[in-house]
Amino acid sequence: MTLRFDKLGVVIAAIAAYAAFAAPFATFRANRIVPGQARSILEALPATTGPLLLAIVIVAALIALLRTPLVLRLAVSVVALAALALLVGVAGTFLTPAGNTFARVSPASGFWILIFTFTLLLADVLTRLNLSPSARIGMLVVAAVAIGLLLVSGAWNDLSILKEYANRADSFWAEGSKHVTLALGSLLAAVVVGLPLGILCHRVERLRSGVLNVLNIIQTIPSIALFGLLIAPLGWIATHVPGAAGLGIRGIGTAPAFVALFLYSLLPVVANTVVGLAGVPRAANDAARGMGMTDRQRLFGVEFPLAFPVILTGIRIVLVQNIGLATIAALIGGGGFGVFVFQGVGQTAMDLVLLGAVPTVALAFAAAIILDAVTEMTATKRRVETA
């Protein structure tokens, strides 16, 4: 019998082998800012648990390497990810001396590489299974619930990122609220302005190139530079326009961050609106005219519904983009998870950096999955209705 290897599985198995046997699984530090001491899987876990995790990784890598049934690949990727999530908490407890509140135990490169490796395997399996949009959202909910249960159970309490969270719980949720408000608020403003502007650009061809060129230029300005450019005009408005300061408009803070994110959001919304409306079949418009529909009725009854999946794709791009860019807002006092990222960089405390980076990545990942699923469901519904 000839063994058949999976091309992606070869890469996954090689990366998993390196992460399990050559890269450190956890890092121990006497306090939050001193250099860490790397620990392998066998050193970071109890005598029975370390070999068990290695065995799980080896079996999962072999199943990924060979051309095995998708259900089996799905099962081993989930088991491997669950084992890593549970046992990294065990490593935190095992490496922390009893009664020591200063020691810090962090997941090291080997852990993160293994998480990436088996997440890649899981994503490949889910892609091949071609799950429905509702099933993908369901899996996201299950993963979120599982992580929530781990957090509530206290299994990760001895990890340094949770210790950083315990010291900053109130500010974490306050900055998280600012982060979400910046991302969603700027998106909403861009949709309110961008949709009518996109419709106008679609209707008036001479206006289209000028507007899109200006928005393209704005998109090329680095985020920090754009934040800086907005400080002077917003500061002038706060000083000279009555009531502006009372509304929160000032040279630094939330206002310039919001305006910058709004400006970055306009291009995807406007461009996708133009593309979506341009892609409406001519036959659908001709049929609507034949029925005696006015331009306004055709726009909202025929063109906009058919273009909506494309427009929603632009909104997805904006939301994921804004969740990431909102991190930079902390540099000008805009708040958000970037506060922890830049505090951690300044203090050489990587666990504090992770406290800001991990929820940002998680929010962007969840937003992408949800809006991808909604876009697909909307497109499918439109195809059914027009069939």
Image (spheres, grey):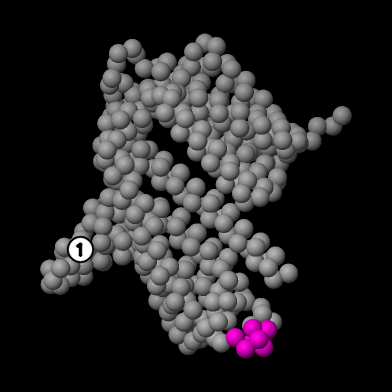
| Image point (62%, 51%), residue name | 133
| Image point (37%, 66%), residue name | 189
Is any part of residue 257 visible from this angle? yes
- Identify the magenta region: 286-293
The residue pinned by badge 1 equals 247
Residue 146, position as x, y percentages in the image: 51, 33
Is any part of residue 105 visible from this angle? no
Establish if 127 lies above or below 116. below
37 with respect to 12 (left or right): left
User: Residue 276, located in which quarter of the rendered image?
Assistant: bottom right
Residue 291 falls within the magenta-colored stretch: yes
| Image point (27%, 50%), residue name | 335
Q: Secondary structure at mark 1?
A: helix
220 with respect to 133 (left or right): left
25 with respect to 125 (left or right): left
What secondary structure prevails in the magenta region? helix
Establish if 204 lies above or below 75. below
Establish if 141 lies above or below 261. above
Residue 302, position as x, y percentages in the image: 60, 77
User: Residue 196, located in which quarter of the rendered image?
Assistant: bottom left
Residue 85 falls within the magenta-colored stretch: no
Q: Amino acid at mark 1?
A: Leu
